[in-house]
Image: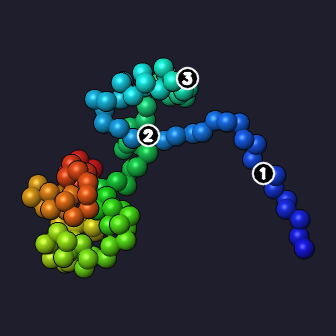
Amino acid sequence: MQALMKKPPIDTGLRVLVISCPEEKYESLVEFLRKNDCTMDDEGGIPASVVYPERTPGTVLRGLRYRDSLTQVDLSKLAGIPRRHISEMENGKRPIGRQTARKLADALNTDPRMFLSA
């Protein structure tokens, strides 16, 4: 039997949390965290475009579909959108308009802006 080579991490009682929030709510969130003795490494935060450079409406759609364990066919039935269109949106070959974003958001229980502002 092999012995464990790596020591288990020491529990410091601290937890690291990664948070995404709208810019207009950022300052109030920072204030709340500071009032609760949380420390932050970076003043001003890091823009989402730096952390998620490949974030596009299509990758957001694919990620939300994966989160809900849905196939393109399943999502097609839920949203009333042809499966081929879902595939094209995920691959960046078809834009996601406002009406389509609303249908997808209803089916995936999210905000339509997820598909418009990515």
Lower position in the chain sequence, tag 3 or tag 2: 2
Q: Position of residue 5 (x, y in %)?
A: 85, 59
Q: Position of residue 68 (x, y in %)?
A: 35, 66
Q: Residue 37's mark?
A: 3
The residue under the point 26% across, 54% down is 110
Q: Callout 1 environment at 10 Å: few (<14), some (14 to 19), or many (20+)?
A: few
118 relative position to 11: left or right: left
The mark that comes first in sequence, 2 or 1, is 1
**Residue placed most toward the observer, 18 or 77:** 77
For residue 38, side relative to residue 22 (left or right): right
Type of amino acid under label 3: Asp
From mark 2 to mark 1, how far is it between C-alphas?
26 Å
How many residues crowd around disc 2 within 10 Å: few (fewer than 14), some, or many (20 or more)?
few
Residue 36, image x, y percentages: 51, 24
What amino acid type is highlighted by mark number 1? Pro
Q: Which residue is mark 1?
A: 8
Between the C-alphas of marks 1 and 3, the distance is 27 Å
Q: Nearer the viewer, residue 64 or 35?
A: 35
Looking at the rendered structure, the secondary structure element under dot 3 is: loop
| Callouts 1 and 3 close, C-beta under 8 Å | no
**Alpha carbon separation for disc pair 3 and 2:** 16 Å
Residue at image point 31% right, 58% down: 60
Element carrying mark 1: loop
Q: Residue at x 39, y 50 (%)?
A: 53
The amino acid type of the residue labelled 2 equals Ile
